[in-house]
Image (cartoon, grey):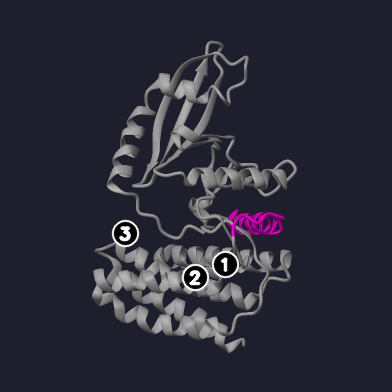
Amino acid sequence: MRFRFKPTLEQRSALRAQLARLQRPAVVREILGSVLPVDFKPTDVVCTPQSVHSDRFVLRARIHSGVNQERAYALKAYSDDFGQQVWAHSQALAEHSQSNPHGLCLAMAYIPHERLLIFPWVEGVFLSEIVDERKPALLQEVARIAANLHRSAVVPEPPTTAQMFVEETRARCERLRRRWPSAAPFTGPLMDALQEALTLLDPAESAPVHGDMASGQFLWTGERLVLLDLDMFGYTDPAYDAGHFLAQLERRCLLDPPLQAFAPQWLASFRDSYLAEMPKVSARNVTFYRGLTLVRKIYTLCRKQAAEWPQLVPPLALHARAALQEVVASA
């Protein structure tokens, strides 16, 4: 699992140049030639940035033909060769699924010299934006998609252990201590609680995981849910994905007061459905990874919401501690 990657200055510069170049219609037309049907005669291309980061970017490419046909693709470029690993994993998942029952949006092609993956463009609404009566049923469907992925007979890499997750979390907390020292008092006791809870985990068999499972990674097309983005794929206790998803959902409700009343129902909808689908997955381990993710998100809050974190971190830390205390109490 790729926890953290910082591109070099040269890689950042090259990625910015590539972003500009891939917005030229002629360049994109040539790249898409490998996935377009042979009878599709492109007339014009419109390429629009969707997300831009220091190590990757995503473009939406809309390509038209002379007979009023249109196709759309997502082009995802990386600053290094990591896209090759995502492509290999996508192919392995495709080989182990019939009609893609996992609900995954898998890459269609990889262009090595561009370090670029091509995906079908999926129109829809992010699950994180749906807050009405549809939510509980959609969360149950998320649980089924997660379980299907975790049942895949794919081994993408060596296992990531619970200790490795704790050490990565410790590294985040150390970076937080250096950059926001006034937030450190919240994370010190939580790291102690994490280390204690770590010793109480149930044994677990590793499975392929998404690695960054959250409501913002699911698109609702109106007919089905689609899971995006395999950039954090890994091989570990499947409880990690379930706990991560619960923590992200809990954090969203915690930081958005109008949603707080829905949190118990929404969390239970996913958790109960997932554990019913995957009875061999430890509920204690799910709670542990929920707590671990909440601890990690303290750093995220400080980094992304610098002005608001003094008000946002205390309740998040409180929920993280409650989750880790639940692990200890259930042992």
What residue span does the magenta drawing correspond to? Answer: 134-157
Q: Quadrant of residue 178?
A: bottom left
Q: Secondary structure at mark 1?
A: helix
Q: Is residue 102 above or below residue 244?
A: above
Residue at (58%, 23%) from the top-left corner? 36
Residue 299 placement (x, y as % from top left):
35, 67
Q: Which residue is mark 1?
A: 240
Residue 70 placement (x, y as % from top left):
54, 21
What's the CA distance linking mark 2 and mark 3?
A: 22 Å
Q: Is residue 327 above or below residue 12?
A: below
Residue at (52%, 51%) from the top-left corner? 217
**Upstream in sequence: badge 3 or badge 1:** 1
Q: Which residue is mark 2?
A: 165
Mark 3 neighbour density, 10 Å: few (under 14) some (14–19) many (20 or more): few
Q: Is residue 200 left or right of residue 8?
A: right
Q: Secondary structure at mark 3?
A: helix
Q: Which mark is residue 304?
A: 3
Q: Which mark is residue 277?
A: none
Q: Quadrant of the C terminus?
A: bottom right
**Upstream in sequence: badge 2 or badge 3:** 2
Judge by depth and name the residue closer to the eye, 186 or 125: 186
